[in-house]
Amino acid sequence: MTASTTVTEFTMPSLGADMDAGTVLEWLVSPGDEVHRGQVVAVVDTAKAAIEIEVFSAGVVREILVEPGTKVAVGTPLATIEVPLAAAEARAPVSPTRSVRVAKPPVRHLAHELGLDVESISGTGPGGTVTRQDVLSAARRAEQAGQAEQTEPAGRAGEATVAPGPSGPPTPGLPGTRPRVTPRARRTADELGVDLARVIGTGSGGAITDGDVRAAASAAAAAPETAARRAPEPSAAGAEPGPEPAGEPAAEPGPPAARRPAVRRSRESQEAMRAAIAALMARSKREIPHYYVSLTIDMTPALDWLTGYNADRPVKDRILPAALLARAVVVALATTPQLNGHWEDGRLHLADHVDLGIAVALRGGGMVAPAIMAAEQLDLSTLMGRLSDLVRRARAGRLRQSEMAGGSITVSNLGESGAEGLAGVIYPPQVALVGIGGIAERPWAISGMLAVRRTVTVTVAADHRASDGRTGSAFLAALAETLTKPEEL
Amino acid sequence: MNSQQARDAVIAAVTLVAPELDASSLEGSGSLRQQADLDSMDFLDFLTQIAETTGVDVPEDDYGEWETLDGAVAYLVAHG
């Protein structure tokens, strides 16, 4: 294999401007394992949360260099990966203009955070410069490639290359040797403590789907002797072997010990999270001249529509007002793209997609703001599913690297906490944060009459360097308008 | 479903969503959501879990009956 492969280092990524070191909690792969782009290979503990770390090159794990429990600086090699030479070439720039493509340091930093080689990304900026968007697009393609490989038959991997555009040479697909499991099914299995080796897949090509896992969990629940295994025992669950012949043990890359319920974080880690939040928020207030505009919006039509929508749907398919509001924010942003982007190098860089950051309060204190990438491509029910999944994983301390780095705007929804409004602090280098207060009945004047309506107060905090109050106001007007036509969301 | 089974199902579902919760400290007549610190997303997860383990899919109109642990248990006994 040595003649046709090259060895690359997989390093500790920086998962935010405020992170300089991380602790490897566990490895989900072993030497000799094949990995594909976007595959979660390790879990790293940072001040904010345990983050699932993805690889961005397909190949074979050669050596694990850092043992679990070890804290290392950002940039420290964690493992070596043997990459097929064809793939390595595919990652290399094909254009002879590569030497003039100089990425700005923040862009290089972002690429580094996401585990991408900036040299392998085609630039679309002036003179072929690699922009922040190019990096995010490359990361998104890499992640989609990873997901496709997990859900589609092996070999499709070649369709997604790191270089943008259809002209990039395809990488050879690596044959899959494990039963395929959809990412959602894997998470569900993790949550429910289901041993995937004992689940029969009914998806395409025998892939294990979310439904298969849930069916297996229900069957297990019905059998009294297995009931104890489902109890949320963080350390013991799954560590014991199943009573039935368990397929191939190696078939499941995520060790059962990966089940980590949303535990109360230790005082030290709470303090570390507090310090990380403090650093980021202080930086925001130091650097960003915030302005705020608010509007109280009549939510009654939207909520009535939602009640009708949810009435004939089972619990799992219902949509929450928070998802409806998030979707409305995404739609309204089309009228004011200046609020969706990043302030870097002294100017506003508009984002190509709405990577919707979601501020999530954690049990026991603290918060994180992971992003739903390219949220403008998701319809309402899909967005609800993603939101629910993101919040659950944030609280269980299992977020992904790409979710931690890429938001282009953030929504913070105080929901039922009782507060009327939220004038938030922008996440740098983003340029806006949409704060949503609680939905409450209020007196409301309509055409000279007084009525009682369910209303919500939305406050935009925006970066005055990037936009003016008029922009924030136009956004809120568009948001209110959007919410009068919930059926179009 | 008898009352003990219903109670077990509710406790199992709520501790799955709120693992740090000490179920023995739950007051039957107090607000379940407040005691377990469940926001709307958590509450939906909780009811999804109830639907999966008991087959009882609670319509939105009935959410009011799930305000307390006692209410939830009574609901499951009546509908399960």
Image: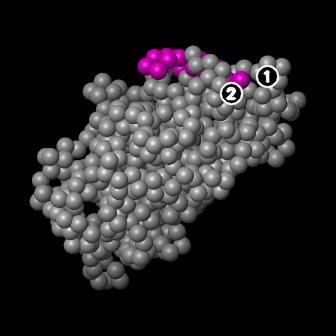
Badge 2 element: strand
> What label does residue A416 carry, if any?
none
Nearest to the observer: residue A235 or residue B20: A235
Rendered location of residue A322, percent (x, y): 40, 59
Q: Which residues are magenta?
A: A66-82
Quadrant housing the N terminus of chain A = top right
Disc 1 residue crowd, few under 14, some 14–19, many 20+, Cα 10 Å: few
Give the alpha-carbon distance from disc 2 to disc 1, as whole Å. Answer: 10 Å
User: What amino acid is labelled 2 in the image?
Assistant: Val
Nearest to the observer: residue A443 or residue A135: A135
For the view shown, which residue lies furthest in the right direction?
Answer: A96
For the residues labelled 2 and 1, say whether their Cβ atoms are less than 8 Å apart: yes
Q: Quadrant of residue A239?
A: top left
Rendered location of residue A401, percent (x, y): 53, 35
User: What amino acid is labelled 1 in the image?
Assistant: Met
Image height of A1 relative to A126, above or below: above
Is tag 2's residue or tag 1's residue first in the polypeptide sequence?
Answer: 1
Q: What chain is tagged by disc 2? A: A
Q: Residue at label 2?
A: A60
> What label does residue A1 carry, if any?
1
Rendered location of residue A100, percent (x, y): 81, 27
Q: Is residue A292 visible?
A: no
Q: Residue at x 31, y 32 (%)?
A: A265
Asked if the stretch drawn in magenta spans residue A481, the answer is no
Disc 2 residue crowd, few under 14, some 14–19, many 20+, Cα 10 Å: many
Q: Quadrant of residue B32?
A: bottom left
Q: Is residue A84 visible?
A: yes
Image height of A88 relative to A175, above or below: above
Image height of A286 relative to A160, above or below: above
Badge 1 element: loop
Query: Left or right of A248: which side holds A265?
Result: left
